[in-house]
Amino acid sequence: MTQQQSLENCRVLIIEDEYFIGDDLANALRSLGAHVIGPVPELDEAMAEEHDGFDVAIVDINLRGTSAYPIADKLMRLGKPFIFATGYSADYLPDRFHHIHRCEKPYELENVTAALGALCGREHRACVAA
């Protein structure tokens, strides 16, 4: 059984190149009350985004064959919280990102919303039946 609380008024930037994954995630987050920006599918576009219009970002590490680490570095410099949503294991991450929460694809929406809720300052719980 899963309990999800609202992401009401949490502004989420989605950086994801897979259309259906990004669209499904955006719709799910909207249903929880989040204001969604994106999905943004390319590194250049993500780097050009204004970084004061959102509270938290979800970053796919591989954007059409290009590493998204430059945007992750930029978000860290700007003090913008983010999580990785990726098919890559933790071993693939450079040391500077080992403290960043990572949801491995295929991810559970409850895990993503829990991580986002924590970064947006809201309490979320993902309850798993034993």
Image (cartoon, rainbow, N blue to C red):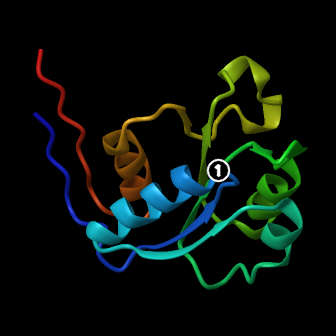
Residue 54 figure quarter: bottom right
In depth, the one of 109 and 27 nearer the eye is 27
**Image quarter of the N terminus:** top left
Q: What residue do we see at 35% from left, 47% from top? A: 114
Residue 31 figure quarter: bottom left
Amino acid carrying mark 1 in the image: Glu
User: Would residue 6 be visible to someone looking at this image?
Assistant: yes
Question: In terms of secondary structure, where does tag 1 sit?
Answer: loop
**Image quarter of the C terminus:** top left
Residue picked out by circle 1: 18
Residue 85 percent coordinates (x, y) = 58, 42
Residue 74 percent coordinates (x, y) = 83, 62
Q: In this view, does 114 lie above or below 27?
A: above
Residue 105 percent coordinates (x, y) = 54, 32
Q: Is residue 130 left or right of residue 103?
A: left
In depth, the one of 84 and 75 nearer the eye is 84
Q: What residue do we see at 76% from left, 79% from top? A: 49
In depth, the one of 13 and 52 nearer the eye is 13
Q: Residues within 10 Å of mark 1 (few under 14, many from 20)?
A: some
Q: What residue do we see at 78% from left, 23% from top? A: 92
